[in-house]
Image (cartoon, rainbow, N blue to C red):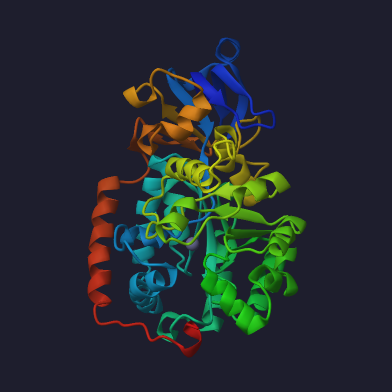
């Protein structure tokens, strides 16, 4: 007897051959995939406790969202027309100020409820693995544990540029980072992981970046960092370090570690080659880049050169959602129009960017990212029966260009059904929404009088 049998679905395995099984089945036992193949073969072979009929549904590995900031879920719809630097100062900093004041008083509930809300949204849209670059709040992983998502907390570190009243002392940052790592890394049977997230090359001093690199070396974990999101950053690093951002990161040894570089828009040809040389994974956030008017990364070059590009939503304050199907479609359209060439990207590649490439970027490709025997059972079922997905054409094309995030019906993570027929089974969704709304009101009230003090080095 096995735990779960999914039958009669169109299974898009995302395995090495990119196999699509038209009438396929997946067998799950405990947390892992036991078998995958044609329905008629597997139904005669296995008896299951739970049988999920996936007729008129696509069965995929869950989406891997390689970059977000879950606390920003409190800030959806709060800004419309601001470029990156103004958006950071006007929108993010007042909330960060309040959050920091609360952290100093060991009040951790803000990010906890924001994270739960963000995880509910993510799971509803088919994300089974999410990375969040968030501050040093120990309850973020508690949210991962409770809701059952596969979660990675990239501990956001910074010691400059940001106004002092928002920064925690470095000693406290390092102390809290170590505490969170000890408590949460590989918790819940490896479902929760910790890595380091120095925010950008200019928000950390060189010596702090070197300390963070050393810590990541000791932990043997990857580093995630925003790089070359706006021309401002390139100018500032050039002025202060006499090098381009990627050049600078190479010079201090950061790229010797497994690195996930987020955005990578404003890169020189030399920098792109360095990314390739060090096997840096790139997290592409098309909707955030479009909304903030940041620019367009050179996706065709990256793909042609074999750079591993994964997809992400970024935080809900710059997107303003955590919908991976939205990110997939946006990436498709953005690069076609930028290059005025509809052959520049295809649906098959886009789906791989949102699944197996994401797993590879996070160093989890042996565990997740495709539907293959012995991998962790992170699987989503997407409805294809609605008017906007009928009559059925090429399934990959339809998922990218017709399907909506809300078509995700059922989500399995680590072998457990976390959402069934669009109902989240692990937390009380209504209660989480209510608490998140209360906290947002409190944050805005507490931040009312706050005006960020711009440091001399903050702007050129
Ligand atoms: Zn970000």
Q: At x 69% / y 32%, what residue is drawn?
A: 16
Q: Is residue 13 visible?
A: yes
Q: Horizontal placement of 155 versus 390: left or right? A: right
State the image quarter where residue 250 is shown.
Answer: bottom right
Q: Is residue 257 visible?
A: no
Q: Horizontal placement of 320 versus 399: left or right? A: left
x then y, percent, for residue 258: 70, 59
Q: At x 59% / y 46%, what residue is drawn?
A: 358
In the rendered image, the residue lying farthest to the front is 340
Name above or below for residue 418 compared with residue 444: above
x then y, percent, for residue 219: 68, 64
In the rendered image, the residue lying farthest to the bottom is 456
Name above or below for residue 70 compared with residue 390: below
Image label count: 0
Image quarter where the N terminus lies is top right
Nearest the viewer among 421 and 34 is 421
x then y, percent, for residue 237: 61, 77
Nearest the viewer among 376 and 226 is 226
In the rendered image, the residue lying farthest to the right is 277
x then y, percent, for residue 7: 50, 18
Nearest the viewer among 233 and 46 is 233
């Amino acid at each position: 007897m096995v735990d779960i049998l999914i039958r009669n679905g169109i299974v898009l395995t995302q395995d090495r051959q990119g196999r699509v099984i038209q009438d396929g089945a997946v067998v799950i036992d405990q947390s892992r995939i036991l078998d995958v193949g044609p329905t008629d073969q597997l139904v005669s072979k296995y008896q299951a406790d739970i049988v999920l009929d996936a007729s008129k549904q696509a069965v995929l590995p869950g989406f891997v969202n390689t970059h977000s900031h879950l606390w920003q879920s409190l800030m959806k719809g709060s800004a419309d027309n601001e470029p990156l630097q103004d958006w950071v100062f006007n929108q993010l900093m007042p909330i960060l100020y309040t959050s920091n004041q609360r952290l100093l008083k060991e009040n951790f509930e803000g990010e906890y409820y924001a994270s739960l809300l963000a995880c509910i949204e993510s799971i509803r849209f088919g994300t089974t693995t999410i990375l969040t670059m968030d501050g040093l709040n120990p309850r973020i992983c508690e949210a991962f544990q409770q809701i059952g998502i596969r979660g990675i907390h990239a501990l956001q570190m910074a010691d400059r540029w940001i106004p002092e009243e928002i920064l925690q002392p470095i000693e406290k940052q390092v102390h809290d980072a170590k505490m969170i790592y000890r408590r949460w890394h590989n918790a819940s049977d490896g479902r929760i992981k910790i890595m380091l997230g120095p925010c950008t090359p200019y928000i950390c001093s060189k010596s702090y970046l070197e300390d963070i690199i050393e810590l990541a070396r000791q932990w043997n974990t990857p580093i995630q960092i925003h790089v070359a999101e706006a021309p401002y950053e390139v100018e500032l690093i050039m002025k202060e370090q006499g090098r381009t951002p990627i050049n600078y990161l190479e010079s201090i040894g950061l790229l010797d570690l497994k690195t996930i570089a987020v955005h990578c828009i404003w890169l020189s040809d030399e920098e792109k080659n360095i990314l390739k040389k060090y096997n840096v994974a790139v997290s592409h956030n098309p909707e955030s880049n479009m909304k903030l008017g940041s620019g367009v990364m050179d996706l065709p070059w990256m793909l042609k050169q074999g750079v591993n590009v994964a997809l992400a939503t970024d935080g809900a304050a710059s997107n303003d959602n955590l919908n991976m199907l939205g990110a997939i479609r946006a990436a498709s359209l953005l690069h076609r129009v930028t290059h005025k060439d509809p052959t520049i990207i295809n649906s098959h590649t886009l789906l791989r960017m949102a699944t197996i490439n994401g797993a590879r970027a996070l160093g989890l490709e042996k565990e997740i990212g495709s539907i293959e025997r012995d991998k962790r059972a992170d699987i989503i079922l997407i409805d294809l029966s609605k008017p906007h997905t009928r009559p059925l054409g090429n399934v990959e094309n339809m998922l990218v260009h017709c399907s909506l995030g809300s078509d995700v019906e059922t989500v399995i993570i680590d072998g457990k059904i976390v959402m069934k027929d669009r109902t989240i089974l692990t937390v009380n969704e209504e209660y989480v929404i209510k608490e998140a709304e209360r906290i947002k009101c409190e944050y805005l009230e507490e931040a009312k009088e706050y005006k960020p003090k711009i440091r001399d080095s903050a702007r050129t």
